[in-house]
């Protein structure tokens, strides 16, 4: 490599095919890339771009990037870089003979045969282009049909719910009942707020209560559980592993099963009939800690080591280095926390009508009988829409977190 | 004798050294405990303490008004030998857990796998559609309209339209149908957190593994699933199993909202609704705690069994 060329580098980890890991840095220029060991500054792996077969399996988390480099001699390296995105783009830009992505099964077979150094007698062109080998057309069609069918079954009750909430009274009691109204109306929604607005506790009051509980509970959970997840994931201290094992077991116990002793504990703490009875347990929800800890384990330890050497305190590291890097996990914690708080009925720990939640109100309207069907549906739509919308807008981030959700036994 | 003593003393020294080492490490990591403390305190108060008190109260008679009185195993004996409703509850919970647990789990996995075969934009849509029912919480109450007992119920009207039934059926109040409807509704909601974990797990698998599998003679998607996908997804599979156990054993809201509380002839009673009944309606806390304790035990055993089973997958 000539010294004056445009070199670009990043620190990171190299993992060889036999699973050994080395810390060091990757340097790339126009012709090739080299990975140097941190301790000895010796090159551990280097390749010219014309020896490169493929760059695969690129994953990004925070600022770090993981990619697998596959060489033509079938050597492969998994490289995890702290600031790898730039380097990855650089390699991709200067890598001249990128393989054309195979479009047919024939081409794929030829490419693989070429890798093994053989020649095969398969026509390169097939009629159907496909994404993967090992996939039959009949199977693909079957899967699409099945997914479409089951998808309709899954979505039908929700469509029916929205339809019911928009139905005027005469259509609610028509035979046969239509799934979607012919003359949609917002009457049911306005009834909720106007008619019930005159009742002793207006509907909006339930809404405000629920929003308050959800916001405070979720925010506290995010901060408290993240702090715990941070030390559990990144520091080795006595008791840490055991504590996490207990939390994992507690994933299984729902609020109902612990409901009775919880009631007794809360009445001893004087929290019955206050919002705290709902908010404080939500702070300690095991699922949030579990997911956050699993996700934080994927953060490069070098980030924290570097900051420690620079003299940053643990709280600084947590707040200004770790937290900004785990934003996808925030969203996941938020959605699980919102889902459970938003759907809480809280009938057992809260007695005053003015402090009750949306789901409780829904149950009350429902108890009003068949004449309230439209309003029940309207209230239900309001309750259902919030978690679903949050999920729709944060899906990709949430899936990124769930990728590290597994329990390693 | 000499030998054993030296072993014992060596063991004691080892213990002591280990403890000293542990203490030193704990001191060095003081700040770690500070970080953990807020969560740990809350977690202890609202999760560990309740479980512990549950176990203790399960050996007592306790009705909140009087102090708890120790009665040994009487609660458990009453539960199993005298409480017929509890036996119905166990039967129902067992049926629900056996059907919706494994079926829901397998369906979650299969659909996550199928969805993974879709192009990216379609995948995003499909994930929302399949995941929406479980995240939507109270949305299942719409089934009380769909399965309503009169002719305005959607299901009744469809069946009558096609001439399958003559008169409307009481889907939610007739003990003959209740369990079937419950199982359908619970299955509808079973694509939950585990499903999401599977979808993410499929996307995280190293694609070059499929390629080398192809070179090694994997010839169709089922072989690919068994030899490559399943082994690399073991952690997600265990997580999904834990989530399935949780939802299968903790069925409570659905029967209460759809079939009434209490339901006709207790036909839709589950262990958790039974617990709820004794805990919050009759205030027999000791008895309710015994139910809870049994439930804890069964769930923990289930998880142990499943992790042992999963240990063999794909080998």
Image (tube, coloured by chain):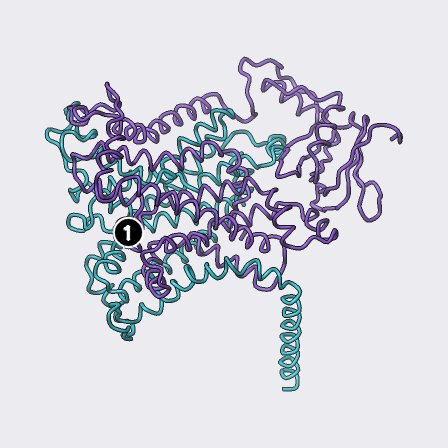
Which quadrant would residue A328 be assigned to in this image?
Answer: top right
For the colour purple, the matching chain is A
Dot 1: chain letter:
A
Label 1 Cα crowd, 10 Å radius (few <14 / some 14-19 / many 20+): some
Instruction: Tell me if B287 is positioned left or right of B310 in this view.
Output: left
Mark 1 element type: loop
What residue is shown at x 73% (from left), y 49% (from top)?
A306
Which quadrant would residue B258 be assigned to in this image?
Answer: top left
Percent coordinates x, y for residue A9 in the rendering = 78, 36
Percent coordinates x, y for residue B130 in the rendering = 40, 33
What residue is shown at x 31% (from left), y 51% (from top)?
A346
Q: Colour of chain B?
A: cyan
- The residue carrying mark 1 is A347
Q: Is residue A404 above or below residue B52?
A: above
Screen quadrant of the C terminus of chain B: top right
- Say which of A112 and A10 sits in front: A10
Percent coordinates x, y for residue A41 in the rendering = 84, 44
């Amino acid at each position: 490599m000539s010294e004056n060329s445009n070199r670009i580098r990043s620190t990171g980890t190299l993992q060889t095919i036999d699973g050994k890991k080395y810390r060091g840095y990757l340097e790339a220029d126009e012709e090739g890339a080299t990975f140097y060991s941190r301790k000895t500054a010796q090159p551990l792996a280097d390749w010219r771009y014309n020896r490169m077969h493929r760059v695969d399996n690129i994953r990004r988390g925070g600022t770090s990037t993981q990619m697998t480099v596959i060489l033509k001699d079938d050597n492969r390296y998994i490289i995890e870089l702290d600031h790898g995105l730039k380097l990855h783009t650089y390699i991709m830009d200067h890598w001249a003979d990128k393989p054309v992505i195979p479009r047919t099964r024939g081409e794929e077979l030829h490419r693989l045969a070429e890798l093994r150094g053989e020649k095969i007698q398969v026509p390169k062109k097939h009629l159907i282009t496909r994404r993967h080998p090992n996939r039959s057309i009949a199977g693909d069609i079957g899967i699409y049909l099945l997914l479409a069918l089951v998808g309709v079954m899954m979505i039908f009750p929700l469509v029916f719910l929205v339809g019911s909430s928009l139905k005027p009274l005469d259509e609610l009691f028509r035979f046969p009942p239509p799934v979607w109204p012919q003359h949609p109306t917002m009457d049911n929604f306005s009834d909720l707020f106007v008619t019930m607005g005159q009742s002793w506790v207006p509907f909006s009051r339930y809404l405000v209560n629920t929003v308050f509980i959800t916001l405070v509970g979720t925010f506290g959970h995010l901060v408290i559980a993240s702090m715990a997840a941070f030390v559990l994931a990144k520091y080795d201290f006595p008791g840490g592993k055991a504590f996490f094992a207990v939390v994992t077991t507690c994933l299984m116990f729902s609020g109902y099963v612990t409901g009775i002793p919880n009631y007794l504990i809360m009445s001893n703490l004087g929290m019955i009939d206050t919002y705290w009875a709902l908010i404080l347990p939500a702070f300690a929800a095991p699922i949030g800690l579990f997911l956050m800890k699993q996700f934080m384990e994927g953060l490069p330890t070098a980030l924290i080591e570097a900051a420690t050497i620079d003299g940053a305190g643990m709280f600084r590291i947590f707040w200004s280095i770790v937290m900004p890097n785990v934003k996808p996990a925030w969203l996941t914690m938020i959605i699980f926390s919102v889902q459970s708080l938003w759907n809480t009925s809280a009938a057992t720990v809260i007695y005053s009508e003015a402090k009750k939640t949306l789901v409780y109100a829904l149950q009350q309207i429902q108890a009003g009988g068949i004449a309230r069907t439209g309003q029940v549906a309207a209230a239900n739509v309001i309750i259902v829409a919030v978690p679903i919308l949050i999920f729709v807008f944060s899906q990709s981030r949430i899936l990124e977190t769930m990728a590290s959700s597994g329990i390693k036994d | 004798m000499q030998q054993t003593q030296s072993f014992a003393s060596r063991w004691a020294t080892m213990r002591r050294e280990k403890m000293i080492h542990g203490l030193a490490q704990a001191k060095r990591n003081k700040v770690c405990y500070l970080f953990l403390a807020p969560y740990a305190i809350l977690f202890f108060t609202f999760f560990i303490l309740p479980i512990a008190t549950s176990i203790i109260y399960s050996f007592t008679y306790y009705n909140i008004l009087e102090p708890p009185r120790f009665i040994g195993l009487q609660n458990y004996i009453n539960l199993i030998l005298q409480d017929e409703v509890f036996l119905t509850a166990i039967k129902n919970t067992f049926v629900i857990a056996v059907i919706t647990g494994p079926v829901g789990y397998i369906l979650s996995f299969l659909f996550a796998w199928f969805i993974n075969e879709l192009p990216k934009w379609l995948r995003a849509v499909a994930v929302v559609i399949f995941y929406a029912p479980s995240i939507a919480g109270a949305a299942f109450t719409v089934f009380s309209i769909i399965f309503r007992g009169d002719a305005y119920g959607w299901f009744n009207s469809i069946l009558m339209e096609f001439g399958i039934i003559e008169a409307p059926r009481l889907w939610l109040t007739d003990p003959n149908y209740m369990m079937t409807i419950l199982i359908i509704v619970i299955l509808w909601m079973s694509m939950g957190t585990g499903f999401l974990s599977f979808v993410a797990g499929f996307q995280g698998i190293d694609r070059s593994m499929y390629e080398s599998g192809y070179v090694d003679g994997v010839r169709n998607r089922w072989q690919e699933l068994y030899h490559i996908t399943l082994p690399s997804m073991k952690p997600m599979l265990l997580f999904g199993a834990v989530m399935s156990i949780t939802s299968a054993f903790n069925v409570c809201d659905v029967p209460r909202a759809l079939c009434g509380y209490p339901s006709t002839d207790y036909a839709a009673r589950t262990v958790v609704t039974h617990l709820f009944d004794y805990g919050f309606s009759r205030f027999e806390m000791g008895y309710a705690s015994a139910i809870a304790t049994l439930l804890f035990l069964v769930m923990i055993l289930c998880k142990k069994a499943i992790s042992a089973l999963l240990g063999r997958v794909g080998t």
